[in-house]
Amino acid sequence: QVQMEESGPGLVKPSETLSLTCLVSGGSMSRYFWSWIRQSADKGLEWVGRIYSSGSTNYSPSLKSRVTMSIDTSKNKFSLRLTSVTAADTAVYYCARSTAGIMYYYMDVWGKGTTVTVSS
Amino acid sequence: QSVLTQPPSASGTPGQRVTITCSGRNSNIGTNTISWYQRLPGTAPKLLIYKTDQRPSGVPDRISGSKSGTSASLAISALQSEDEADYYCASWDDSLSDYVFGTGTKVTVL
């Protein structure tokens, strides 16, 4: 079965760039969307964005100016970059496999999450 | 702030039925299907319901989803101690071009 694991620095300084990678094992990345979601104590669950196996992306409007996602299906991984971080970006970041179509979109496999703290 | 509104808490005794509501707008629940996620303490969210009323393999049939207009519901029948968790609804919002989550409901088994 498909498993996913996030990795990256647990501590990022304000104004710097947060970079996370999600490694996918046990299945193909083709024909799926691959998403990032975060959860902070005060904001609940928040969708960051998604990337299709072809490389096309959609980002949350609130983060669009700072987010970049990339994918490498040959290495079974995809990545998130979030620039100019502030304390408000402190959260647990999850990667997830997603399925989408007309009128539906959902995440059926989730990673365990990685905690990122923004602090000097 | 979340676009989808849920009650902050719900509770019941073992064996009872608990229903969680999710209130949205025409641009999200009124147009698109809903997903429900369960988050047990210290774990990642788990998909419970997709396409409003479909259960993934492994989710028991005592859990069900529905929607009417711009509101959705998740019902848990025959409540068990293992159901104690946070529950979130979610839907695509056509106006925002964003995937929006509910505010979350903490279910307590008394």
Image: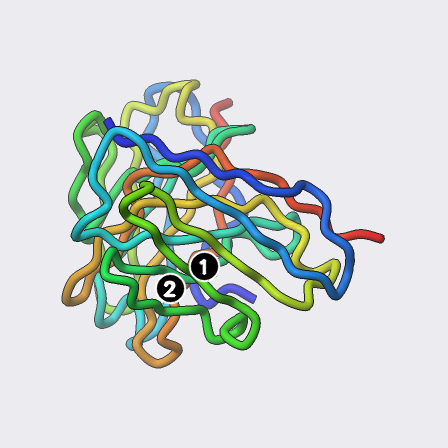
Would you say the residues marked 2 and 1 are in contact, meaning their CB atoms lie under 8 Å apart?
Answer: yes
Q: Amino acid at mark 2?
A: Tyr
- Please state which amino acid type lies under the numbered disc 1: Trp
Number of callouts in the render?
2
Task: For mark 1, name the chain.
Answer: A
Q: Nearer the viewer, residue B109 or A59?
A: A59
- Quarter location, residue A86: bottom right
Mark 2 belongs to chain = B
Number of other residues with Cα within 10 Å of mark 2, as a class: few under 14, some 14 to 19, many 20 or more? many
What residue lies at 45% left-to-right and 59% top-to-bottom? A47
Locate residue B29: give its quadrant: bottom left
- Location of residue B20 in the rendering, given as x and y in whole percent from the top left corner: 38, 46
The verdict on a common chain for dots 2 and 1 is no
Question: Which residue in the structure is indicated by mark 2?
Answer: B99
What residue appears at the point 22 percent right and 34 percent down from the top-left corner?
A: A27
Residue sitting farthest toward the bottom: B95
Is residue A17 in view from this perspective?
yes
- Badge 1 density bin: few <14, some 14–19, many ≥20, Cα 10 Å: many
Which residue of the protein is positioned furthest toward the front in this rendering?
A74
Q: Is residue B39 visible?
A: no
State the residue at coordinates (57%, 38%). Answer: A114
Please determine whether, in this image, residue A87 is positioned above or below residue A63. above
Q: Along the horizontal axis of the image, is B27 left or right of B31? A: right
Q: Secondary structure at mark 2?
A: strand
**Most foreground residue, A82 or A102:** A82
Tell me which corner region of the image, top left, top right, bottom left or bottom right, holds residue B91.
Answer: bottom left
Which of these two is toward me, B47 or B12? B47
Read off the residue under disc 1: A47
- Quick one: SS at disc 1? strand
List x then y, in percent, for residue A62.
53, 73
